[in-house]
Image (spheres, grey):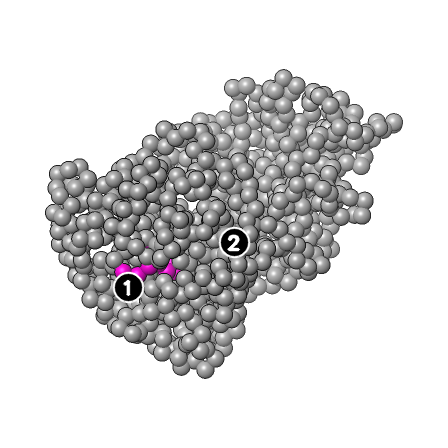
Amino acid sequence: MKKGKKAISLLLCAAMTLSLAACTKNGGGNGTNGGGTAANSSGNDAAKQGVYKEEPLNIEGIPGDSSINDVALIDGKLYMLVNEYRYDEMQGMVLQLITANEDGSNAETKEIYNNLTPNPYYNNDGEEGGDGDVDDGVVPLAKETAADTALLSSIQPATEDADTQTEDTAVPGDSTEGSDEEEAVTDEPIEDEPAGDAYDNTYVSDTIFCEGGIFLLIESSKTDADGNYTSKLDLYAYNLDGTEKYNKELFVNDGDNYQYLNRLAGSKNGEFAGVSDSELFLFDTEGNETGRVTIDTSTGWMNNMFFDKNGDVNLFMVNNDYTKLSLYKYDKTGKQIGEPVDLCSKLLNYNLNCGVNYDIFVTDNQGAYGYNIGDSDLTMLFSYINSDINSNDVSSLYEIDENRILMTYYSDNDGNNRLAFLTHVDPKDVPDKQTLVLGCYYLDWDLRARIVDFNKNNDNFRITVTDYSQYNTGDDYTAGYTQLNNDILSGKMPDMLALNSTSDIPVDSYISKGLFADISEMIKNDSELNYDDYLSNVFEAYMHDGKLYTLVPKFSVNTVMGKTSIVGDKEGWTMEDLKALMAKYPDASVFGDTTTRSELLWMFMMYSGSQFVNRETGKCSFDSQEFVDLLEFMKQFPEEFDYSTLPDDYWMNSQKAYRDGKILLMSLNISDVESYITNIGMFGEPVTLIGFPAKEGNGAIISPNNVYMISSKSKNSDGAWQFLRYYLTDEYQKNGNDSWSLPIKKDALKEKINKGTEKPYWINSDGGKEYYEYTAWLGDEEVTLDPLTQEQADDLYNYICSVTQAYYSDDSLSNIITEESAAFFSGQKSAQDVADIIQSRAQIYINESR
């Protein structure tokens, strides 16, 4: 890893916004395939909608370590603003204008801005190095030198006093020739010298790119010898050939006076607008402020802004509850903001830009859509998945015309940023394949990449996606699950389901209705997979009547840990055991001083909920003595905790509390070895994974990363298995990049755990291992931890294999317990009376949901 990249990236504005295409003649908002489909289309026809052919452009001059800020196509010529990150003698960002023909040929590059400073870690061998304390690529700030001050001064607007500018320093719009006699600059540290008039921490906060030109917002700040802080905001305007038009000092902020712009938008004629949180600013073609309007933010906040097709400023406001998006247009004649127009609430989840065929061009990681003011829904124009494009690699989309989109993306081939044209493909020209519908609730990056790879390489089947999160609204964030449940019950269940949990759908009910296929038989009938190679306890935790309806390829284990000297060396215990422990250590906290009843209820449902609801029969047992004991245990904890009462050093000292015996138990998630070593190191002596008190089992649970199901009614179950079987192959199970989960394959799990028996390492540029230490912070002290012994590694593997309970969560059931237990906590009813009421309500709820 190159040192400095992480630190510098935090200071740079690599604004991959989509709104800037709206400023171009040929690009800017929306439109696309000339006849889109509804955003929720499904079926065989849906697989042929929104299909675009990718045509990569080979443009020379785009630096390798860079990001493409903005793109425009104007009169057949491509314009790109590119941020290059440099880490040689000078480190920082260089903003370049790259122009090329529409086919990418005849590329030319012009540097228009930089904020380079000397790199203290660059050595004479031409590589970064040094003895500084560098962690994970973060470079500590170097001590300021005279050379730094001269360079930082030079990137300000040229003035009559700019004696320190030299011809060797590229500056925004630099038209100042070097002085006849260049001033000598040394690298001697400045000792106690005032900063003077030099601004530092200079960076680009926003850019816009349109037919009217290129505009940069430059933020700078300085602190004088007395500690007085001043910041300012400058505007730099350039012609499309990169020559400077003008630069303006917009605001200078010191003391209580503070003005800023957090977003720009440009028009075709060179006028532009900027917004702060509460004001709209209008500027003419020379950068002169022509108007300023206060925005009423009492009921919401500014979400977006752009010039529409008519040249009017459009402001988008979200209400404080994040349930409504409204459009406000600036009235140029009356010089005021007009009345709000409420938009489709779905737009809250998308990026909005000026449209071509539609009023608004809408994008997300699924594709692009069109929206006209007043419509109740979106119209799909372009689909990443249908076009075999992985949106994980895409930075931005810019619409060119009704059939073309310009895409900036990260290339897997060379690791650099690239451009490609996307051209609409007529549905009749898309090859026929059998269609598989996959239902999900937010399509994660890993599943998306897998679907694209499957669609590219499978000759017979093609997957389309119904992402049920699209049904969510600002008023109802669970509307997607409601729609999914409705589809399943009405016979419209997708061929496959891929969810991050099953807590929001009644899986047990659907299994009892025979709606899911038995995956265990598919595994056993697969000639390339061996059923016995996988953890039987994970399979069994998700089985019903000996059949596996839910596939969990990777998982983690949740459990409770304590010192062996305090909790003993056995695994598993009861609520009576916990009560006895608390009586033995009355001055210690169980899980921490801030633990509340609601947190304990969440832990109870997660660890023990399935023990009070039989998943196969639906029988509840909340009237049992074990549950009564749990209510009495929870009563000892506060309903709420006032964090303002904690001392300032509480959280730092709490890191030592396990070792000091002030906190007895730690609830932990075992998903990787390194964090497990850190957690056991917090105790400073042997520990026991004792689990949460339970009437059976060891008190630990299996938490799935994702769960997959196949519809028993699917006409293409063979195709569905062709897709899902990948998650059991070595390619997926032994994927070293997936560090925060445990593989279900036995040998893959052993390999992962055994890595903890050696020191952690990273791979250097020569392919060798660079070892470092496991560490943990105990207060203000960092302690070194030993790797696992082989015995500890074997014990951890065996423990994971012994967990038989699955994660349980049911919000409706939790609400019943919360509502009824309040009478016991307030002293109105006994624990047994409340348990009986909960039992009655819970049984009715479970019966109805089955």
Q: Nearer the observer, disc 1 or disc 2?
A: 2
Answer whether labels 1 and 2 touch (C-beta < 8 Å): no
Q: Who is closer to the viewer here, 335 or 277? A: 277
Corner quadrant of residue 614? bottom left
Q: Position of residue 515 (x, y in %)?
A: 27, 71
Q: Who is closer to the viewer here, 783 or 484? A: 783
Q: Position of residue 318 (x, y in %)?
A: 39, 39
- In the rendered structure, the answer to whether residue 550 lies left or right of residue 625 reads right
Residue at 54 percent across and 29 percent down: it is 260
Residue at 38 percent across and 58 percent down: it is 703
Above or below, 623 against 248 in this view is below
Residue at 75 percent across and 22 percent down: it is 161
Q: Please say whether residue 816 is one of the residues in the magenta stretch.
A: no
Direction right: furthest residue: 181
The label number, if any, that marks residue 507 in the structure image? 1
| Residue to which mark 2 is pinned | 674
- Mark 1, Cα crowd under 10 Å, few <14 / some 14-19 / many 20+, is many
CA–CA distance in space, label 1 to label 2: 34 Å
Secondary structure beneath disc 2?
Answer: helix
Q: Amino acid at mark 2?
A: Glu
Corner quadrant of residue 484? bottom left
- In the rendered structure, the answer to whether residue 109 lies left or right of residue 433 reads right
Magenta highlight range:
696-706
